[in-house]
Image (cartoon, helix red, strand yellow):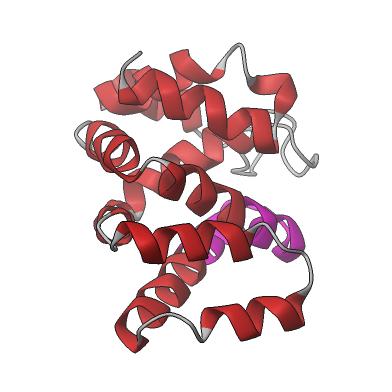
Amino acid sequence: MDALEDVSIRLPERVAPDEVELAPSIAEAAAQGGKEWDNLIKPFGGAMHGGILPGAEGVGDIHALMDVVRTCSNILSSFCQIGSASLSIIVSFLALRDRAQRARDVQKLASNERELLERSINAIMVELEKRGVVQQRAAELADHTLITLGEKPDVGRDFVERISSGK
């Protein structure tokens, strides 16, 4: 299984199970870019959230996430290049819902890694919010995107590169 297919299946399994079947073709369209991708993500009814039932939680999340990966590819590629020990810590604490524990665990990272993590989360959230995703859902999607990329960083980096190649 190549990186594009791997991540495009693992990510929706976490965040949008109803989109698992469509996700690989959405990822492929994102990687190809051009008119096909532009038409796929065009605003629908004046809203951006994936162009499918905008604003409905979980609907069109994969469209929005693929577009965000394209937009944030530089920082996400850098995120995937953090050392494996640090990525293991990051993946573990991003899965925690206990914010106090997360705050303690993040202190285990080097300052440059903490900064890159914070910039990655913020970049994803800002871009998702621009696309009409509410803040709480954007935070959840950001966490799960980084978990998915960080679990297999080489695959994650290849995925980001493939998605962004269609810009």
Going by the image, does 122 lie left or right of 87? right
Q: Write the start and end of the magenta stretch as one range.
A: 124-141
Across and down, in percent, residue 53 comes to 75, 31
Residue at coordinates 75% horizontally, 63% vertically from top-left? 136
Which quadrant: the C terminus? top left
Q: Nearer the viewer, residue 151 or 117?
A: 151
Q: Is residue 71 visible?
A: yes
The residue most toward the front is 85
Q: Dividing the picture into quarters, in which one does residue 139 lie?
A: bottom right
Across and down, in percent, residue 112 comes to 30, 83
Q: Dividing the picture into quarters, in which one does residue 12 lie?
A: top right
Q: Dividing the picture into quarters, in which one does residue 86 lie?
A: bottom left
Reply above or below: 19 against 115.
above
Q: Is residue 51 visible?
A: no
> In the rendered structure, does residue 130 fall within the stretch colored magenta?
yes
Q: Main secondary structure of the magenta part?
A: helix
Going by the image, does 145 lie left or right of 139? left
